[in-house]
Image (cartoon, rainbow, N blue to C red):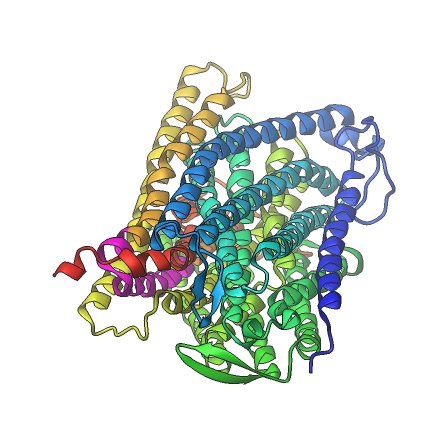
Amino acid sequence: MAVLGTVAVEVFILVAALIGIAFAVLQWYVVARVAVISDAGGGAGGKGRGGGSGDVLEEDEEEEYGVDRLAVEARCAEIQQAISIGAMSFLLTEYKYLAVFMAAFAAVIFLFLGSARRFSARPEPCAYDPARGCRPALANAAFSAVAFLLGALTSVLSGYLGMRVATFANARTALEAHRGIDRAFAIAFRSGAVMGFLLASSALLVLYAAINLFGLYYGDDWGGLYESITDYGLGGSSVALFGRVGGGIYTKAADVGADLVGKVERNIPEDDPRNPAVIADNVGDNVGDIAGMGSDLFGSYAELLCAALFVASISSFGTEHNFAAMMYPLLVSAVGLLVCAVTTLVATDVSTVECTDEIGPILKRQILISTVLMTGGVAAVTFLALPARFTLFDFGNDKHVKNWHLFICVSAGLWAGLVIGYVTEYFTSNAYGPVRAVARSCRTGAATNVIFGLAVGYKSVIVSILAIAAAIYAGFRLAAMYGIALAALGMLSTIATGLAIDAYGPISDNAGGIAEMAGMPRRVRDRTDALDAAGNTTAAIGKGFAIGSAALVSLALFGAYESRAGIAAVDVLSPRVFVGLLAGAMLPYWFSAMTMRSVGSAALRMVEEVRRQFDAIPGLAEGLATPDYATCVRISTDASLRKMMAPGALVMLSPLVAGTLFGVETLAGLLAGALVSGVQVAISASNSGGAWDNAKKYIEVLYSGCNGASEEARSLGPKGSEAHKAAVIGDTIGDPLKDTSGPSLNILIKLMAVESLVFAPFFAAHGGIIFNRL
């Protein structure tokens, strides 16, 4: 018998979400104590760790700058404002396009789902208990459309809040880097924690509120309630797709253009203010790596919760109306918020960073600590909220399950995520052999660098896929499709910490750009480069978590789609299924080709513009003139908004076309093919790009660790050497792989799955127009 009652469950979820928001506000306050301009009102604060003072730059340090400290701070504030304005302008323009899309697609949802039952306003027999009457199809269609809009708006809010946090923290991290690596790390990580806790808490709070508000109408029709709630995840992932693709095209067009002309052709440092694309590059870090990533992980989080709730609603939890057991996925997420708060305090208030080679281990310990603590938290909530025995729906059969089985399912996903994180770090950090081998290959040119980088990406797939496969087997063996959904939940149960270490990287990258453009000393840039190098690895780890969880979520959604579409079994030897399987395996390559070409064509325009400005503006190369930053920002903005449409349409239309024209079995094959192919392409692309990026950093960073750079790194450098130029070329190839195509593929596989689940009643009633006539 479960210990927690309905009231206790509701209070716990609500309080945990509010604690998460309060914790984010606290971290924001600490970051805000660092004043960007020394005489800014309210900017002064104490001098504790991660804090700061009104006088960020000391009086006796002015000689090092060659200018007074107020001028340096004013320059930082000016650059920060330019980045913030550029990022805000892009997001507002993008969101105008998305507003039209959201309204149109909500109408499509209403029309398709309503037409499945001819817009009937009469009560329908419940799908899994025909003896009972459930809410009419017309109401389900309307509530589904509302849930879609709610998820889309929450995803938009997630991206916007992430961007605001990052642009608020970048200059503060740069200023604190002057005072020490410890202070800079604390500010960057606290800022990432603000984003992580705001996103995770708001996602949990909005979903919980939607369940309660929709429940006022649905009453005891829990099947209809959670079917309509599924569209909350669809809305989140739909916005995430366009945010990831559009933001990725923006940032990589600017990044590639800035690097090829600036580093390779003109031999000027990264983020040099003479480079016309430098502002666009720094804006791109925020709209792609922050706003796009925030929407992406929110989409994964929302989808896995919706998938778990839907599958649970057709189990004994739903038929017996056991509210505490139904809310088990939300309880696990609530525990995750509390665990992540403790874990964050370890990084910001317990651990100390004395030198740069301690950054990576501290970030890695965040994953380990949160995993260990979360295991205990999951055990507690499992035995308090769940009955000792219950039954789950298993494709027409009842599967008898014990509560400790669900604990194993969640733990399997949780620890599989840890394995993926550690494997990703090994293949993308320049502290280990694979990346150093890529760096050594630069001695013989760009071609060998590319070959080695591709090999690293391909090899990194092996252990990650085995970890995902083990979690899938454990989940399905113990609790059918609900177990797989819980494994995905386990992998993202510590999403607040995952987002913190993920957002930390772009914030550090921006801080390095601001330090370079503001003319700060070389040692400040060395510190921010070290922060950024660790951030590249943590970003790759974050992508690994997102891709792994997407595989598990997609499989759970696939199972839910089969049950809702009335498919007894998927036979891969059936021609209808196999045709879909082949087409689905092809879609990730088609999608990647579209996104890579979009980045390439936008980067081509950027390169031509940067070259034109260096040739046409007298004194620009010597630093005697100011480049036209606005034109480069406009090129990235226009290219990303125009070119995000086609890849987005491919993903959104594929399930609709396959289900309508070819039927539910062909669509099942399409989903399976896209899942199997997309996960592996995504992992290899993300890790190859991360390896190339950190191989370049390995050659560039002379201030590396307590004892300086290694002899091997010195032999490959310095910046501007032939090996460094080869590394830059590899990095530019990897940029669209790790920041555009790779991360977007995880959205492709889960978005197609949740869209298929939402439209399953229509496909079952009216699909197969072509195959049914052949």
Residue 247 location, x and y as percent? 47, 40
Asked if one can make out residue 354 in the rendered structure from this viewpoint, the answer is no
Question: In this view, which residue lies farthest toward the left?
Answer: 774
The answer to whether residue 568 is magenta is no
Q: Is residue 46 left or right of residue 25?
A: right
The answer to whether residue 679 is magenta is yes
Would you place residue 600 above or below residue 544 in this image?
above
Q: Which residues are drawn in magenta?
A: 657-684
Residue 70 location, x and y as percent? 77, 25
Question: In this view, which residue lies farthest toward the front?
Answer: 122
Would you place residue 571 above or below residue 686 in this image?
below
Residue 528 location, x and y as percent? 64, 44
Q: In this view, does 395 lie to the left or right of 74?
A: left
Would you place residue 699 above or below residue 681 in this image?
above
Q: Is residue 460 left or right of residue 312?
A: left
Asked if one can make out residue 334 in the rendered structure from this viewpoint, the answer is yes
Residue 102 location, x and y as percent? 46, 40
Q: In which quarter of the image is residue 323?
A: bottom right
Number of on-image labels: 0
In this view, the residue in front, 499 or 105, is: 105
Q: Name the chief secondary structure element in magenta.
A: helix
Quarter of the figure with the N terminus: bottom right
In this view, the residue in front, 36 or 354, is: 36
Q: Is residue 725 left or right of residue 362?
A: left
Question: In this view, which residue lies farthest toward the top?
Answer: 618
In this view, the residue in front, 747 or 227, is: 227
Identify which residue is drawn at 64% across, 81% down.
387
Quarter of the figure with the C terminus: bottom left
